[in-house]
Image: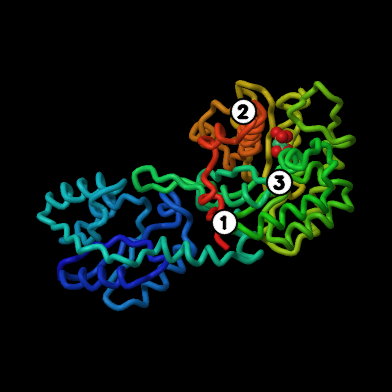
């Protein structure tokens, strides 16, 4: 029997998949190239089911003789290896980011007189629509909490954006761009102490206490499904931190980040312009240990934030702390800096890469925002947090509106900068 290659994600089987498999079966023995989790994550949200789970489902479907992993969204490597007589693919790949792959498939098949068969794409049913429908029903704390660890295993770089209320939560949840068929979106949310405080008209000094922060967090969780990382300042006293860990974990938060500072809380971006004191390595390590011993699940992460560069204590101090915090059980390291050129962050990354015992590395490029994601990823960064950009862009827009109304003694002039009444009414469906 000739062999027939069909690529599939199979996260969600629907009649469209069955049509393709039936069609493929007419030409010979069907080999499914099953996209690995990394392959799927490279162009859209990570699959709901793992590779092994998806494989198990396909193994029990009639008409498939073999399943092989497809390590990229591009099937060329597998096709060159397997040399199938036929490749069967829905005709929807004639446009979009897969169209160059299609051209290459035709070329490669030509080498052994293979043929591309393109059945009509099944209209009216799409796995993406089905997944979106399920997501619109919400999530559970258990499912949300484990999502960050899953993302870290699958994606080379996790992209996080600041939230401070339900509306900004919706922005992170929904904003997507389509770059020739590849979907780009944020992977999760950063519940920032700075922007949560600022949105309440308060300074970032801990004046907005953890009880108030939890209220905001709940409002955001209510309208989103993506994972959340919470900025818990220095975590409070060690014995209080144990309770904070339990509370956050129960709500389905994926990670808490605590900074190694003590005394009056001041935002790190003030640097040495204000009095900021760093905790001792011993005390902060103890806090991490107590936090780790308090959590009930394997999924919750405690990420240690190192302030040595902010406080001008130097790279050696930052590295020494990173090693100590990892040894104390930290699930991640956040290295912070307020330098504009980002050089000290890249220096830190270089040294960090040679650690034997590494955990995911988090950065917050607020002052060195010119550095692109890929450069940070190549330097060894695993998580990028855009920590304050929604509030910083919204505030000037609102000031402009307020000033225009004062100046013109009517709102007519601001209308062109405002969304329509219809759009705001429909922004959040009832
Ligand atoms: C925050 O967003 O509150 C942070 C990051 O802690 S920074 O403002 O850079 O300190
Ligand atoms: Mg903060």
Residue ranking furthest to the front: 409
Percent position (x, y) of residue 212? 81, 51
Q: Nearer the viewer, mark 2 or mark 1?
A: 2
Q: Element at badge 3?
A: strand
Q: Which residue occupies the foreground of this view, 63 or 101?
A: 101
Q: Which residue occupies the foreground of this view, 399 or 264?
A: 399
Query: In what quadrant of the picture does the C terminus appear?
Result: bottom right
Query: In what quadrant of the picture does the N terminus appear?
Result: bottom left
Q: Element at badge 1?
A: loop
Residue 297 in sight from this viewpoint:
yes
Q: What's the mark number on residue 408?
A: 2
Q: Is residue 297 left or right of residue 290?
A: left
Q: Nearer the viewer, mark 3 or mark 2?
A: 2
Q: Residues within 10 Å of mark 3 (few under 14, many from 20)?
A: many
Work out whether mark 3 precedes mark 2 in sequence or the reverse, and give the earlier one. 3
Residue 413 picture quarter: top right
């Amino acid at each position: 029997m000739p062999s027939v290659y069909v690529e599939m994600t199979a996260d969600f089987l629907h009649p469209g998949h069955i049509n393709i498999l039936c069609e493929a079966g007419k030409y010979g023995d069907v080999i499914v190239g099953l996209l690995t989790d990394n392959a799927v994550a490279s162009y859209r949200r990570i699959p709901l089911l793992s590779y092994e789970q998806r494989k198990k489902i396909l193994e029990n479907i009639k008409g498939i003789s073999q399943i092989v992993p497809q390590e990229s969204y591009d099937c060329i490597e597998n096709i060159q290896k397997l040399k199938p007589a036929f490749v069967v693919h829905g005709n929807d790949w004639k446009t979009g980011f897969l169209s160059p792959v299609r051209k290459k498939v035709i070329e490669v098949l030509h080498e052994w007189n293979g043929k591309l068969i393109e059945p009509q794409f099944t209209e009216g049913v799409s796995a993406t629509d089905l997944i979106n429908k399920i997501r619109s029903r919400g999530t559970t704390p258990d499912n949300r909490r484990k999502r960050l660890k899953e993302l870290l295993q699958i994606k080379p770089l996790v992209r996080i954006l600041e939230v401070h209320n339900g509306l900004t939560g919706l922005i992170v949840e929904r904003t997507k761009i389509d770059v020739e068929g590849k979907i780009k979106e944020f992977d999760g949310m950063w519940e920032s102490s700075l922007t949560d405080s600022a949105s309440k008209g308060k300074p970032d000094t801990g004046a907005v206490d953890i009880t108030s922060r939890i209220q905001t967090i709940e409002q955001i969780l209510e309208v989103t499904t993506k994972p959340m990382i919470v900025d818990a300042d220095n975590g409070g006293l060690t014995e209080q931190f144990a309770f904070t860990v339990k509370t956050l974990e129960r709500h389905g938060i994926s990670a808490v980040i605590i900074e190694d500072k003590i005394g009056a809380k001041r935002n790190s971006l003030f640097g040495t312009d204000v009095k900021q004191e760093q905790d001792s390595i011993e005390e902060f390590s103890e806090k991490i240990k107590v936090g780790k011993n308090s959590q009930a699940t394997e999924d919750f992460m405690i990420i240690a934030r190192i302030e040595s560069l902010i406080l001008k204590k130097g790279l050696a101090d930052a590295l020494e702390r990173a090693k100590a915090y990892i040894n104390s059980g930290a699930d991640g390291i956040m290295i912070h800096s307020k330098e504009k050129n980002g050089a000290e962050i890249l220096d830190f990354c270089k040294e960090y890469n040679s650690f034997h015992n590494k955990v995911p590395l988090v950065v917050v490029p607020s002052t060195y925002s010119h550095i692109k994601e890929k450069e940070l990823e190549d330097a060894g960064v695993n998580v990028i947090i855009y920590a304050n950009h929604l509030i910083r862009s919204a505030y000037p827009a609102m000031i402009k509106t307020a000033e225009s109304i004062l100046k013109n003694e009517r709102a007519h002039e601001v209308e062109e900068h405002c969304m329509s009444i219809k759009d705001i009414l429909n922004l959040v469906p009832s």
